[in-house]
Each structure stands twice: as structure tokens, then as C-alpha cells.
Image (spheres, coloured by chain):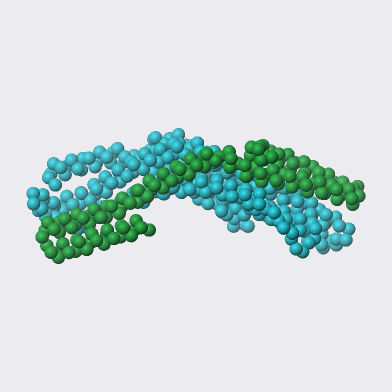
């Protein structure tokens, strides 16, 4: 490599470095990583449509005082769980891909020049400084190319995905908050009716009444915890959707300070929600 | 029932849940005045109303898939594209390893050192094999 071409090589490298040096995929990665962590909490939610169906059958069994439970038809509830899982998998898959694609480690390429030795090779002279510079610039150039490529791709994907992902997150949240969470309310009323009759039975002793009240309070507490899980999860989903909207609106200026601030805020809020959810899990 | 959209089915669930709550509360407040038969009739009505609310919530969670069917396909396609880009980028490191090993071989050939050539050929073969194995997995 002649001196001129080597200088050109370095100049090109620095120019490319300047052009893409301001790109910050870290914000995108931080946001998508936290979003993914929030989404994963869904797998920890201690309540499903099928579970609500099984609980209904268990309450019926108690009401009828039957030792053996009759057939419990939960097909519709199983279908509801399947639909919910389809929504979850689609949203989770998207954020998983976004997290992997925006990860810095992905393009930490290294050009292995350990075997490149200084010396004269025909008309080309390679000295030690050349080797060191070549290694450094190669890495920078590769990074510059691939980071620029990733930024462009991510901007396209975020642009295409915003509308469907907003609607899917909304539908997922609606299913959990407007339907599954309300089933907990239905279940609460079923228990209330059952325990009310137990307590009002003229043959119930004072001690038995205390036990009934304790049992009822315990059921209420469990019901409330499950509801809280769904409330916190729903809050997390809304933050994820808001974060994606910010990302969408600033997708062509990923280095802009405002976007950095917005995504950092989103990430912090998502982190808080994750902590709240984990606390709730520990209490159970 | 299934022809209604998810939000309307859920709203019907809310309506029956509220209705059930009123019937249940009536029974709890007036239990002393009700005969055993009346109590049983109201209790059964309460249970049935709760069953309806339950069914509307379940139906709403099922039909929501109709509202988002096309969007599910779109997002799944985008996710596939993202993963393809990711796969493409992970392959670059393998290509770089092979290229660097190739340069080492070229240098060795240039230096006309038989031992260095043998080492470099072995190095290239090793890197190539590693890349091919990773590819297969």
C-alpha cells in the first residue's frame, strides 16, 4: 500500500467516522431491552382465562358440596388464552428482534491482523505503524458501515411497525385490563356469595365464623394481588406504546437530543414498572 | 354474540357484572327478610348474571383477534425482516475471520517460508471450518 493510498484510506475512515459517529443506537437498545423485560412479566402473571374457568368450577363444587368435580368445560377460555398468547408472541417477537438488532455487541467486529508482519512485499512496504493504523481504521470503517446500515434498517422497521404495534399493544392491554381483570371481579362476587351463606348458616359456631372470615379475606387478598399485577402490566404496556411512538417520530434523527431524553425517560419509567411488578411478585 | 366487536362484548360484560352486583347486594342486605326459597332464587339469578358477564369477557378476548388479524401478519413480517438483518450482520464476523486468515496465507506465500505457509493453510482451514459449522447450527 503506497503512502498516498494509505492516507486516502485514513481520510475516508475519518470522514465516515464523522458521518456516523453521532449515531446512538444505545437509546434504542435501552428502550427495547426494558420493553422486553416488561413484556416478559406477562409470563409471571398468576391468572389466565383458563384459570378463571377452573376457579369458577371449583366454586360451583363448593356450592354443591360435591367431592368429585363434574366436567369443567373451559374450551372458550382456552381459546381466549390462545388469542392472548398470539398477541403476546407477536409483540414480544418484534421487541426481541429490535433489541438484538440495536445491541452494540452485534457489530463489534474485529479484523484479525495478528499475522500481518512488517516488511517489504514486492513494491509494497508495510511498517509497524501502518499495521496498527490499518487495524484501527478497519475496525472503525466496519463499525461505521454496519452502524449506519443498522440505523437505516431500524428507522425503516420502526416506521413500518409503528401503526400495527400500537394497535396490537392496545388490543393486548384491552384483553388483559377490560376482560381478564374483570373476570377477577366476577370471581370476587362468586366468593362473596359463597362465604356469605356459610357465615349466615345458623349452625355455624363463632370460631367457624372467624375461620370463614379469615378464608374470605385471604381470597380477597389473592384476588387483589392478581388484579394489581394486571394493572401494573397494563401501565407498562402503555409506556411501551408511548416509547415506540417517540421512537417512530424521531426515527430519522436517532441522535437527536430530544429523542435521547424521551427514550431515556421511557426506559426509566419501564424500569420502575418492572421493579413494581417484581415487588408484587415477592409479596405473593 | 360473536358478530359484535370486542369492545362492545366487553361493555356487555360490564353491564351484566354491574347488574349482578346489584342483585347480590340486594340479597346480602335483605337476607333477614327473605325466605329460604326467595334467597335461593335470588342467589341463582346472581350466579347466572355472573356467568353471562364471564362469557361476554371471554368472547371479547376471542373476537379481538378479528380486529387485529391483518396487523398480526404485518408485524410478524417485519419481525422476520429484523431477524434476517440480524442474521446478516452476525455473518459478517465470520466473513472477516475468513478474510483475515486468507491475508495471512497470502503473506506466508509471499514470504516463501514453507513453515509459515503450512501454518497459514492450517489457520485458514480451521477458520473456514468454524464458520461453516456455525452456519450449519
Residue A6: where, in percent of width, then height?
A: 16, 44
**Residue drawn at (26%, 62%), measured in percent from left and top?**
B126
Residue B135: where, in percent of width, then height?
A: 34, 56
Looking at the image, residue B41 sits to the left or right of residue A184; the answer is: right
Image quadrant holding the N terminus of chain B, namely top right
Decide if residue A30 is in sight here.
Answer: no
Q: Which chain is green?
A: B
**Residue drawn at (38%, 58%), measured in percent from left and top?**
B137
* Viewer-nearest residue: B109 or A119: B109
* Viewer-nearest residue: B96 or A240: B96
Picture quarter containing residue B81?
top left
Decide if residue A79 is in sight here.
Answer: yes
Question: Compared with residue A211, is residue A251 higher up or lower down, i.e. above or below?
Answer: above
**Residue drawn at (51%, 46%), measured in percent from left and top?**
A90
**Residue drawn at (14%, 55%), measured in percent from left and top?**
A118
Residue A153: where, in percent of width, then height?
A: 38, 40
* Viewer-nearest residue: B54 or A95: B54
Looking at the image, residue A178 sits to the left or right of residue A166; the answer is: right
Picture quarter containing residue A194?
bottom right
Looking at the image, residue A163 sits to the left or right of residue A21; the answer is: right
Q: Which chain is cyan?
A: A
Q: Residue furthest bottom?
A: B115
Residue A137: where, in percent of width, then height?
A: 23, 47
How many numbered discs, if any? 0
Amino acid at each position: 500500500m503506497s503512502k498516498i493510498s494509505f492516507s486516502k484510506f485514513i481520510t475516508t475512515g475519518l470522514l465516515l467516522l464523522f458521518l456516523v459517529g453521532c449515531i446512538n443506537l444505545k437509546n434504542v437498545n435501552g428502550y427495547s431491552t426494558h420493553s422486553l423485560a416488561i413484556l416478559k412479566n406477562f409470563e409471571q402473571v398468576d391468572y389466565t382465562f383458563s384459570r378463571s374457568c377452573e376457579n369458577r368450577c371449583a366454586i360451583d363444587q363448593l356450592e354443591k358440596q360435591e367431592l368429585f368435580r363434574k366436567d369443567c368445560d373451559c374450551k372458550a377460555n382456552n381459546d381466549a388464552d390462545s388469542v392472548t398468547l398470539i398477541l403476546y408472541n407477536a409483540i414480544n417477537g418484534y421487541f426481541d428482534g429490535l433489541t438484538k438488532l440495536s445491541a452494540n455487541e452485534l457489530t463489534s467486529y474485529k479484523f484479525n491482523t495478528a499475522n500481518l508482519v512488517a516488511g517489504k512485499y514486492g513494491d509494497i512496504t508495510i511498517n509497524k505503524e501502518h499495521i496498527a493504523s490499518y487495524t484501527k481504521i478497519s475496525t472503525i470503517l466496519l463499525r461505521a458501515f454496519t452502524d449506519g446500515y443498522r440505523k437505516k434498517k431500524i428507522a425503516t422497521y420502526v416506521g413500518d411497525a409503528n401503526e400495527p404495534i400500537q394497535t396490537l399493544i392496545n388490543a393486548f392491554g384491552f384483553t388483559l385490563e377490560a376482560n381478564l381483570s374483570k373476570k377477577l371481579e366476577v370471581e370476587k362476587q362468586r366468593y362473596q356469595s359463597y362465604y356469605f351463606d356459610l357465615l349466615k348458616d345458623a349452625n355455624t359456631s363463632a370460631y367457624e365464623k372467624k375461620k370463614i372470615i379469615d378464608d374470605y379475606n385471604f381470597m380477597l387478598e389473592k384476588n387483589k394481588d392478581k388484579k394489581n399485577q394486571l394493572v401494573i402490566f397494563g401501565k407498562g404496556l402503555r409506556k411501551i406504546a408511548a416509547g415506540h411512538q417517540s421512537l417512530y417520530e424521531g426515527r430519522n434523527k436517532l441522535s437527536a437530543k430530544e429523542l435521547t431524553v424521551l427514550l431515556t425517560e421511557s426506559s426509566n419509567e419501564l424500569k420502575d414498572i418492572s421493579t413494581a411488578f417484581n415487588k408484587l411478585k415477592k409479596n405473593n | 354474540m360473536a358478530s359484535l366487536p370486542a369492545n362492545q362484548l366487553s361493555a356487555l360484560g360490564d353491564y351484566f357484572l354491574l347488574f349482578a352486583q346489584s342483585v347480590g347486594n340486594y340479597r346480602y342486605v335483605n337476607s333477614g327478610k327473605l325466605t329460604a326459597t326467595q334467597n335461593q332464587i335470588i342467589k341463582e339469578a346472581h350466579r347466572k348474571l355472573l356467568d353471562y358477564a364471564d362469557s361476554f369477557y371471554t368472547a371479547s378476548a376471542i373476537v379481538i383477534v378479528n380486529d387485529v388479524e391483518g396487523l398480526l401478519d404485518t408485524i410478524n413480517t417485519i419481525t422476520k425482516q429484523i431477524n434476517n438483518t440480524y442474521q446478516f450482520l452476525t455473518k459478517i464476523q465470520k466473513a472477516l475471520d475468513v478474510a483475515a486468515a486468507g491475508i495471512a496465507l497470502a503473506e506466508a506465500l509471499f514470504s516463501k517460508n514453507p513453515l509459515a505457509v503450512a501454518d497459514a493453510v492450517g489457520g485458514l482451514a480451521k477458520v473456514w471450518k468454524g464458520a461453516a459449522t456455525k452456519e450449519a447450527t
